[in-house]
């Protein structure tokens, strides 16, 4: 494909994105922005936006702002929709530039949020922010947007231009779909089921743009969050460092010294002295676990979970300490293992001993069961409402369509989709009822490998 053909293909894709999202905005903007509930009230819709800002922005506010007053900062929101989160961003920050590929979404957002003086709306082409100046924003933020873009190239173009308009020292927090399973790769990508932009692409993007990559959470899932910082000029003048591991524990429990080998808690947190956080990131620092080098998923200030315990250990001042978090690699044997932090061949910490243990088996539990069409509780033996959607607790990051099965009565069904929902901390399982299923009350169980959930009764109409 020559340059002219590529440009035409890009224009066609942009037209498709605008057309589809304009139509969705006219049909039911609230549902397409905040599924799964149809016919949401204004109160429900607004409340969901407030909760998202609490979780995604307020919880990380010190990291995202560098401790500065948000009222003095200018934020770029990528994919504002009809302003579900924009209202609450405007309450926090001095200026908010709200952008979207859909002119209809922008029109509705302007109508809903008229009178809020510190919001400016812009319709974009979906690829860049050409109308906005370079080095202009203190913070860029995008939630649940790139997962709908059908081209990884377009995602990369948008990320690159968002990075351009960011000030040196500014922070960019964004979410992408990072699923890398064969089943997902085989799905046709459109403006709803977008292309994947996995962890390796995020890390490559940061390296190519000389960005400081602070964290990647949710790698391999639909809701993968990355945070990066635009380096200040001259920030790469490296000074020799000698890291030292001062404290460690399970990432979500600093008092737990035994780290599970697998599951949702198989993450090790290290509190390290002797390094300059401004010079390193999760692309340049590695953690050696039993001689195997692993790239961390977080490198930054001591987290709120660890802060009280670390203060007990080291006193009030924690600025000289850095928290590094890493996942235990799959296949690592149990028992005591040597762990150390490496910055370069010569800059490596003394090893510490960490116990890795077999996790206790977790029994999956089926929560809500709905149909996958309008998310109602009415399930039919045939027709479009014979498509099931389950929300399940007790699965881990290895759960996929290869190791999950549903048993309905005496029939075993392979799901069509398995994914983790960060917003709900639960897994979504989609499956199609078999054609020969009979109406009536029947037992439903879920198998995760060889572990079965307690049965629940399913009414099929």
Image: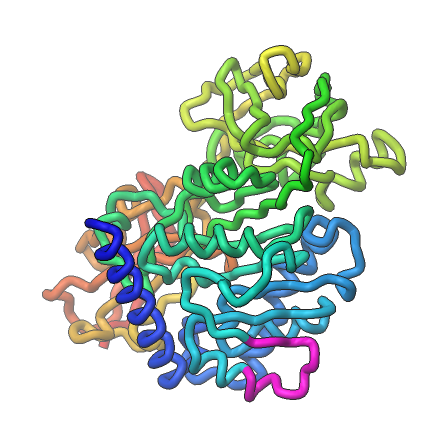
Residue 31 percent across, percent down from the top left: 42, 77
Residue 377 percent across, percent down from the top left: 35, 75
- Which of the two residues, 99 or 360, is positioned nearer the viewer here? 99
Q: Seen from this angle, which residue lies furthest right? A: 316
Q: Quadrant of residue 95?
A: bottom right
Say whether residue 256 is visible: no
- Which of the two residues, 439 or 74, is positioned nearer the viewer here? 74
From this view, report whether residue 70 is shown above or below residue 237: below
Q: Residue at x 29, y 64 (%)?
A: 13
Q: Residue at x 47, y 33 (%)?
A: 262
Q: Quadrant of residue 229?
A: top right
From this view, report whether residue 273 is shown above or below residue 216: above
Screen quadrant of the C terminus: bottom left
Magenta segment range?
A: 110-121
Determine whether, in the image, residue 411 is placed left or right of residue 351.
left
Residue 242 percent across, percent down from the top left: 72, 17
Say whether residue 13 is visible: yes
Residue 288 percent across, percent down from the top left: 55, 19
- Which of the two residues, 142 or 40, is positioned nearer the viewer here? 142
Q: Seen from this angle, which residue lies furthest left? A: 436
From this view, report whether residue 337 is shown above or below residue 182: above
Determine whether, in the image, residue 361 is placed left or right of residue 443.
right
Determine whether, in the image, residue 89 is placed left or right of residue 446.
right
């Amino acid at each position: 494909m020559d340059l002219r053909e590529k440009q035409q293909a890009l224009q066609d894709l942009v037209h498709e994105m605008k057309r589809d999202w304009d139509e969705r905005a006219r049909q039911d903007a609230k549902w397409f922005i905040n599924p799964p509930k149809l016919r949401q009230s204004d109160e429900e819709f607004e409340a969901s936006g407030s909760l998202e800002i609490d979780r995604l922005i307020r919880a990380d506010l010190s990291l995202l702002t560098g401790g500065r007053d948000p009222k003095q900062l200018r934020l770029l929101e990528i994919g504002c929709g009809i302003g579900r989160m924009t209202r609450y961003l405007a309450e926090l920050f001095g200026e908010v530039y709200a952008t979207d590929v859909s002119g209809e979404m922008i029109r509705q957002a302007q109508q809903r949020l008229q009178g809020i003086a510190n919001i400016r709306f812009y319709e974009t082409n979906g690829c860049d922010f050409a109308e906005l100046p370079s080095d202009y924003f203190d913070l860029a933020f995008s939630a649940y947007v790139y997962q709908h873009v059908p081209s990884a190239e377009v995602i990369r173009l948008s990320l690159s231009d968002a990075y351009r308009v960011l000030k040196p020292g500014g922070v960019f927090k964004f979410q992408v779909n990072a699923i890398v399973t064969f089943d997902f790769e085989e799905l046709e990508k459109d403006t709803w089921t977008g292309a994947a932009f996995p962890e390796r692409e995020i890390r490559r993007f940061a390296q190519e743009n000389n960005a400081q990559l602070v964290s990647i959470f949710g790698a391999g899932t639909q809701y993968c969050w990355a945070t990066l910082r635009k380096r200040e000029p001259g920030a790469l003048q490296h000074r020799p460092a000698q890291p030292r591991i001062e404290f460690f524990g399970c990432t979500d429990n600093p008092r737990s010294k035994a780290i599970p080998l697998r599951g949702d808690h198989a993450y090790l947190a290290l509190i390290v002295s002797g390094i300059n956080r401004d010079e390193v990131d999760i692309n340049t620092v590695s953690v050696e676990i039993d001689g195997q080098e692993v790239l961390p998923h977080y490198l930054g200030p001591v987290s709120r979970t660890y802060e009280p315990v670390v203060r007990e250990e080291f006193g009030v001042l924690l600025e000289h300490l850095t928290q590094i978090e890493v996942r235990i690699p799959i296949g690592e044997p149990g028992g005591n293992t040597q762990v150390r932090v490496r910055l370069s061949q010569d800059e490596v910490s003394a090893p510490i001993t960490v116990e890795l243990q077999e996790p206790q088996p977790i029994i999956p539990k089926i929560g809500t069961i709905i149909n996958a069409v309008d998310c109602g509780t009415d399930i039919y033996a045939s027709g479009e409402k014979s498509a099931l959607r389950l929300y399940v607790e007790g699965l881990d990051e290895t759960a996929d369509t290869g190791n999950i099965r549903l048993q309905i009565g005496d029939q075993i069904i392979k799901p069509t989709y398995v994914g983790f929902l960060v917003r709900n901390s639960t897994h979504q399982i989609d499956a199609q009822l078999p054609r020969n299923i009979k109406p009536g009350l029947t037992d439903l169980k879920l198998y995760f490998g060889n572990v079965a959930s307690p049965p629940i009764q399913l009414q099929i109409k």
